[in-house]
């Protein structure tokens, strides 16, 4: 099958998802991927044909080039020459509306769209929400990363038979840096871009109670984002902050050093941090919101707690910190999960089956 993937994101978890998806699909399909100019050649395996379009630099450049017809002409030219069996837009982006129109209405090609967030996160600006809302009406089929997200889309009026469920896998751009020489330390890790909905304040407000019985332990907060709202909670010597976007090698080393990862989210759809943590044999404590409960197997690969419940968070951290055998068992189970259910081979096979169904839906709409 000829598959054309389009993803114009420049960095972050969705970029890692797109790279691993393209590489895994290319083992059983003929895959071409279109990215922004910021994704260098060599980012994908040799089986993947990588094409680039200029999207400008930073938010202003993206906005200005939104109105540049040459960008869409290049995408249309690539697609028309390739004659793919299906086009799959694999990430959210401000340009998805005109791109979807070019693919589905002008070229009349089968179109699939991955929707990571059926419910927009807090603070998502209108200039992203509005075009995204309309671009979601153009594809023939949709791919989401859990059954919960499918139910959410159906509740919002999307046709159930047009929604297909897959999953996220461990990011190879992180796992390739795994080193046996890196030893675990007594670290409780909060990792990822800092946003209000991720509940960092719930962790920090409980830090004193968490660390009181844990001599020699510390909490590390690592990621970019707005740190100002939390500054008054970061005065303990046992809280370390790495306030920047971590490159893959640095992030991988930090995950390896840690004994657990904490996701105290108030709300969520899904998270690539969890399958990546699994691949490093790390148990995760996460709130049971969105699709996090579909990834974390409670008491098998991690611990699920109610949202906005600091007491449950403290108890869960103490269980893992004070019971090394239990923590290691969860870590081993997590690694096994990443190698079976969350493997990219499995994900590629799922996507290929979904593409066949989307192509059928497209044919029926003609």
Image: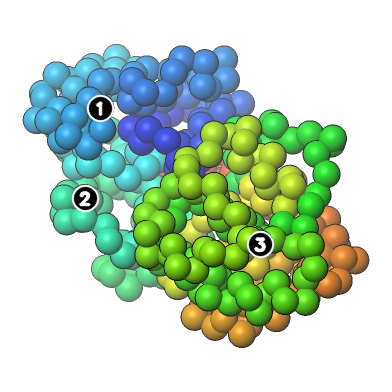
In the rendered image, the vertical position of residue 310 relative to residue 74, given as above or below? below
Q: Nearer the viewer, residue 149 or 3?
A: 149
- The answer to whether one can see residue 99 in this image is no
Q: Which residue is mark 2?
A: 128
Label 1 sits on residue: 57
- Which mark is in front, 3 or 2? 3
Find disc 3 in the rendering and name its residue.
238
- Name the residue: 48% across, 47% down: 243
Residue 10 in view here:
yes
- Local crowd at mark 2 within 10 Å, few (<14), some, or many (≥20)? some
Residue sticking out furthest to the right: 325
Nearer to us in this view, 355 or 287: 287
- SS class of the residue under badge 1? loop
Evaluate if marks 3 and 2 touch, with contact meaning CB atoms under 8 Å apart. no
Q: Earlier in the sequence, mark 1 or mark 3?
A: 1
Position of residue 207 in the picture relative to residue 88 (left or right): right
In terms of sequence position, does the residue under pointer 2 or pointer 1 come before the other?
A: 1
In the depicted structure, whether residue 11 falls above or below residue 311: above
Q: Quadrant of residue 311?
A: bottom right
Q: Residues within 10 Å of mark 1 (few under 14, many from 20)?
A: some
């Amino acid at each position: 099958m000829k598959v054309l993937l389009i993803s114009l994101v420049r960095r972050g978890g969705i970029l890692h998802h797109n790279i691993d998806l393209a590489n895994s699909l290319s083992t059983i399909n003929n895959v071409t991927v279109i990215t922004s100019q910021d994704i260098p050649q060599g980012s994908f395996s040799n089986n993947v044909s990588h094409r680039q379009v200029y999207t400008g630099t930073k938010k202003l450049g993206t906005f200005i080039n939104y109105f540049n017809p040459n960008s869409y002409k290049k995408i249309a030219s690539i697609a028309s020459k390739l004659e793919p069996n299906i086009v799959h837009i694999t990430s959210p982006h401000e340009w998805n509306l005109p791109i979807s129109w070019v693919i589905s209405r002008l070229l009349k090609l089968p179109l699939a769209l991955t929707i990571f967030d059926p419910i927009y996160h807090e603070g998502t600006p209108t200039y992203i929400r509005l075009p995204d809302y309309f671009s979601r009406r153009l594809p023939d089929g949709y791919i989401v990363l859990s059954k919960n997200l499918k139910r959410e889309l159906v509740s919002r009026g999307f046709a159930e038979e047009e929604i297909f469920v897959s999953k996220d896998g461990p990011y190879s751009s992180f796992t390739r840096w795994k080193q046996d020489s890196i030893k675990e330390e007594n670290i409780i890790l909060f990792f990822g871009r800092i946003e209000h909905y991720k509940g960092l304040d719930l962790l920090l407000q409980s830090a004193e109670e968490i660390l009181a019985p844990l001599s020699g332990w510390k909490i590390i907060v690592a990621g970019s984002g707005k740190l100002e709202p939390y500054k008054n909670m970061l005065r303990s010597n046992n809280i370390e902050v790495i306030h920047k976007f971590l490159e893959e090698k640095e992030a991988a080393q930090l995950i390896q050093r840690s004994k657990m990862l904490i996701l105290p989210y108030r709300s969520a759809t899904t998270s690539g941090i969890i399958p990546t943590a699994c691949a490093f044999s790390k148990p995760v404590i996460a709130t049971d919101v969105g699709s996090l409960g579909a990834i974390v197997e409670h008491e098998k690969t991690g611990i699920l707690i109610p949202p906005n419940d600091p007491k449950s968070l403290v108890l869960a951290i103490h269980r893992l910190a004070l019971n090394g055998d239990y923590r290691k068992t969860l870590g081993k189970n997590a690694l096994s999960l990443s190698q079976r259910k969350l493997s990219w081979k499995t994900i590629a096979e799922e996507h290929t089956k979904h593409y066949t169904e989307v192509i059928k839906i497209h044919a029926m709409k003609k």
